[in-house]
Amino acid sequence: MDPLPDPINGRHRPPSDPEDWSDEQWIEWLEETDDEAPAPSQPSRSPKPRVLGSSGGQILGNAMVGVANALYGRKEDPVVVVQEASGPLEEDEPFELHLDPEHPEDSHVVVHRRRRS
C-alpha cells in the first residue's frame, strides 16, 4: 500500500496498520522525517548546579539531613589524636603525661608553666 500524503505538510504519513509498509518504506519515512526535529540552539544544561546553589535547594538538603538525623541519630565520629614521640620523655619536658590503660577516661596531662628567665 502506498503511503498517504499528509494534508498539513505534504509529506507521507505512516499507515494505520504498521504491517502495511515494508522495512524499506519505514526507513525512507524515518529518514524523511529526521530533518523535522530542530537542532538545539544550546547544549542542554543539567538543572543540578542551579538547584544546589538555590536557597530552595539548600533548604531541601538541610531538611533531608535533619530527617536522617531524626530517624537514625547523629553520627558522631570520635576524635582521635595520635602522634609518635621521638623517644622517651625527658625530665625537663613542659608536661607530665599520666595514662591509665585500664580506664582511659582517667588519663590526663599536666602542663607546667615555663619560668621566665
Image: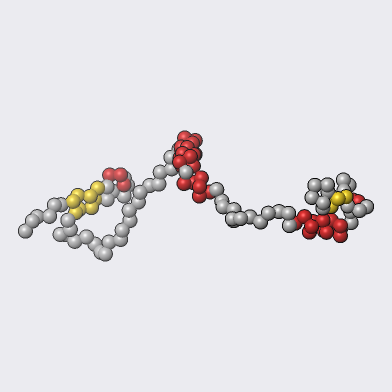
Does any portion of residue 2 appear in the rendered image? yes
Residue at the image point whose x is 77% and y is 55% from the top: 33
Residue at the image point whose x is 79% and y is 50% from the top: 9
Residue at the image point whose x is 86% and y is 60% from the top: 24
> Would residue 54 appear left or right of 46 to someone viewing this image?
left
Quadrant containing the C terminus in the rendered view: bottom left
Q: Measured along the vertical axis of the image, is residue 8 above or below residue 72?
A: below
Q: Residue furthest bottom?
A: 86
Colour scheme of the picture: secondary structure
> Would residue 57 appear left or right of 35 to someone viewing this image?
left
Quarter residue 36 falls in: bottom right
Residue 82: where, in percent of width, then height? Answer: 33, 56
Residue 49: where, in percent of width, then height? Answer: 50, 50
Does any portion of residue 61 appear in the rendered image? no
Residue 96: where, in percent of width, then height? Answer: 20, 53
Q: Nearer the viewer, residue 38 or 67?
A: 38
Q: Nearer the viewer, residue 83 or 105?
A: 83
Q: Measured along the vertical axis of the image, is residue 108 above or below residue 68?
A: below
Residue at the image point whose x is 40% and y is 46% from the top: 77
> Would residue 39 appear left or right of 115 to someone viewing this image?
right
Residue 112: where, in percent of width, then height? Answer: 15, 52
Q: Measured along the vertical axis of the image, is residue 30 above or below residue 70?
A: below
Q: Nearer the viewer, residue 47 or 80?
A: 47
Q: Residue furthest right?
A: 1
Number of marks in the image? 0
